[in-house]
Image: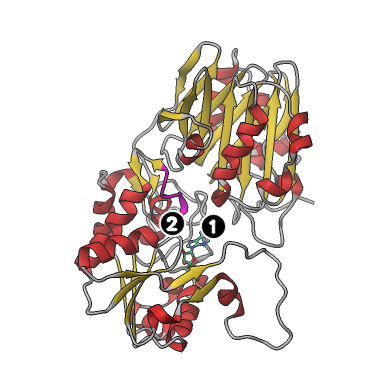
Amino acid sequence: MKEPFDRMREECGVFGIYNHADVSRLTYLGLHQLQHRGQESAGIVTSDTKRFYSHLGMGLVSDVFNQSVLDRLRGRHSIGHVRYGTAGMSLLVNAQPIVVATAWGPLALAHNGNLTNAQILRQRLEKEGSIFQTSADSETILHLIAKSDAKTFVAAMKDAFSQVEGAYSIGILTPKALYAVRDPWGVRPLHIGRLNGSFVLASETCAFEIIGGRLVREVNPGEIVCLDDQGIRSVEKLPSSGRAQCIFEFIYFSRPDSQIFGKSVYQVRRELGRQLAREAPVRADIVVAVPDSANCAAVGYSEQSGIPFEIGLIRSHYVGRTFIEPKQAIRDFGARMKYSVVPEAIRGKRVILVDDSIVRGTTSRKLIRMLRQAGAREIHIKISSPPIVGPCFYGIDTPRDKELIAFRLKTDRIKEYLRADSLTYLSLGGMLKATGLPPRDFCTACFTNMYPIPVPAHGTMK
Ligand code: AMP
């Protein structure tokens, strides 16, 4: 029986090093910095130029690896991966990097993104005799590379990537080289860095900082870059007809200490908050962020409005995926495990609560109830992005249409559902302006339902 593609769990982070004596430990540290991009599984594959060494496991980077495991990962080159997941379909078989033996030699692949035509390609490949080991879309790429009759490995990669559609930022390790590949739209970030005589690739630049590396440049949309003894070389270019960088990387997903798409996430988020204050002023006493993802936007809102920023909510970073619920039901238990209110900051105050996004409305509704219980006099919700009306097919874990509250309800009805005194979203134009980059360079499909890369059964073009 064919396994379904588990397309709802595709958020990921990629990290790799070419030529370092302490390759496994540095890769571990790099993945640790990218942990926010995926918590389901983690994996590292290393090469000593003759063979690969690999270790993959379910859970956080710090749970999957220890000293003795890292000691066993020999060589000077690596590729690593963290993968996002929710309960249910978490399978070790889908952990990455995926390792395969091909006529080109062994290959290890780590993918961030989501392919939109993987199912069609997989059906064709299976008819032709390919045997898939995983239910992940990423494996399709390896089959296409393995089957290519191109003369060189780079030509085989070009052949394979010319057939896949969708979002991919990928690292491929061969015994003697590390390749970085980014889809022609540049949907997900991918960067190349340097650490003395070593080369590094990472989804986000925050992963370079921890190992003492520095950013060299982005991988350009459609570019295949080779990191090997000859240095950093652009070896192929897939035709690209424009960028479609994921705006949600700025809104929520990437870390504020990273640079993506050539901009500081921190600065863009702060500007999103400033823009929100310009568009949606309201009389209030304090600005409170939903930590941590809305911190920068809330600081920007406070700065622009002149209303003081207050730490009114504390986020616990220690909520495991399984926690023990008390026998007697506690209202909003899940939210209370994650967030707690600082009553002294809130009591008697007119609160502006800034969050980066509303998906189902669960978080805001619960936080509003908790803030009211703590004595907030008014609560004005300010969202530093427009209403989310469509799912992501390019690698962010958003639910389907019907579960998105803004797909079902108009803003004033959402306000009623949340029991807020007011609710305002940032405008689409305001969000794009805050990036300081050309608006046409972004995918905004989750806010507009305009999908730049065709999606089966969705299909709208930008
Ligand atoms: P909800 O409670 O369903 O409305 O989700 C909104 C909250 O989840 C906000 O506080 C966001 O910071 C956060 N969020 C937004 N997108 C995602 C995502 N793809 N994965 C996990 N959390 C998210």
Task: Give the numbered dot on residue 397.
Answer: 1
Instruction: Note whether 115 is above or below 330 in the view shown.
Output: above
Tell me residue 240's x, y (percent).
38, 32
Task: Indicate if the residue with disc 1 has its beta carbon within 8 Å of ligand 1.
Answer: yes
Q: Amino acid at mark 2?
A: Tyr
In the rendered image of this protein, does residue 179 appear above or below residue 253? above
Label 2 near ligand 1 (CB < 8 Å): yes
| Magenta-colored segment: predominant secondary structure | loop
Mark 1: which amino acid?
Asp
Seen in the picture, residue 26 relative to 333 is either above or below; the reply is: above
As drawn, the label of residue 181 is: none
Q: Quadrant of residue 446?
A: bottom left
Q: Earlier in the sequence, mark 1 or mark 2?
A: 2
Q: Is residue 254 magenta?
A: yes
Identified at 35% across, 35% down, the residue is 241
- Which stretch appears magenta? 253-258
SS of the residue at dot 2? Answer: helix
Q: Position of residue 60 (x, y in %)?
A: 67, 50
Q: Residues within 10 Å of mark 1 (few under 14, many from 20)?
A: some
Instruction: Mark yes or no: residue 339 visible.
Output: yes
Return the mark for residue 252. Answer: 2
Residue 199 coordinates in the image, percent (x, y): 52, 23
